[in-house]
Amino acid sequence: MVRGRGAEVNVLPDGKLQVKGEDANLGRLVAVDVDMVVLSTAIEAPHDASEVGALFGLSRSQDGFFAEAHPKLRPVETNTEGVFLAGVAQGPKDVPDTVAHAGAAASMALALLSKGEVTISPTTAFVVTSYCVGCGKCVTVCPYSAISLGEDGKSTVNAALCKGCGTCAASCPSKAIQPLHFTDDQMVAQIMGVLE
């Protein structure tokens, strides 16, 4: 038994494996030939991760853990604004990584709280009520739960929850929902500008 941290695993010419690392008790580097190397601990995503993901609108990786918005630029943020990942929620981590990850998530939450007011993106969707037939397709497809049917049976968009993804506009059979700043005319104008 060697207390320390592995640095690298090399495949030797005879097919055996060699682990290089540090012996923390002796304070020196060691190289040990081994038959098998286990690279991560046996850990699985919680059994109720799908329910939590559906509740908060979180995407998950192939192994069932919650996925970050961007691995390099936004490692503790999710695609749902105001929801942050910490520690093993994102995947297997050792103690130093977990502590660093949790500190980053806490600082992101504090940054949100210190603003005092919420800034809403202008890129949201709006409903042309005269076109809306109240079918409710937009309500079921909205990943942010930003759309509801009003008392008049027409769809309404909560601008504080809407992220302007356009899923509702794409699914609306009567074309009653339009994303602000991404109307058909604006998109065609952008395409024509690129092609000139």
Image: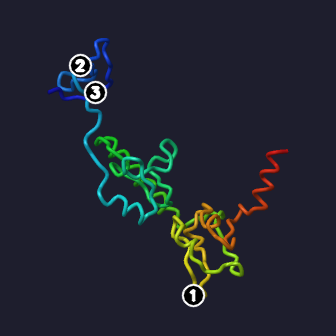
Question: Left or right: 28 with respect to 175?
Answer: left
Number of residues whose C-alpha sits closer than 10 Å to that of mark 2, classed few (under 14), some (14–19) or many (20 or more): few
Q: Which numbered circle lies on residue 109? A: none
Determine the CA span between mark 2 and mark 3: 12 Å
Question: Left or right: 110 with respect to 48?
Answer: right
The x and y percentages for residue 83 are 44, 59
Q: Looking at the image, is 94 positioned above or below residue 22?
A: below
Q: Can you identify the residue that label 1 sits on?
A: 151
Q: Can you identify the residue that label 2 sits on?
A: 28
Determine the CA span between mark 2 and mark 1: 73 Å
Q: Which corner quadrant of the image does residue 171 belong to?
A: bottom right
Question: What is the three-letter code of the residue carrying label 2?
Answer: Arg
Work out whether residue 177 or residue 120 is closer to the camera in this orientation and state it.
Answer: 177
Q: Residue at x 60, y 77 (%)?
A: 156
Question: What is the three-letter code of the residue carrying label 3?
Answer: Gly
The x and y percentages for residue 32 are 22, 18
Tag 3 and tag 1, C-beta contact below 8 Å: no
Q: Quadrant of the C terminus?
A: top right
Q: Which corner quadrant of the image does residue 189 belong to?
A: bottom right
Indicate the secondary structure of the residue bearing disc 2.
Answer: strand
Indicate the secondary structure of the residue bearing disc 3.
Answer: strand
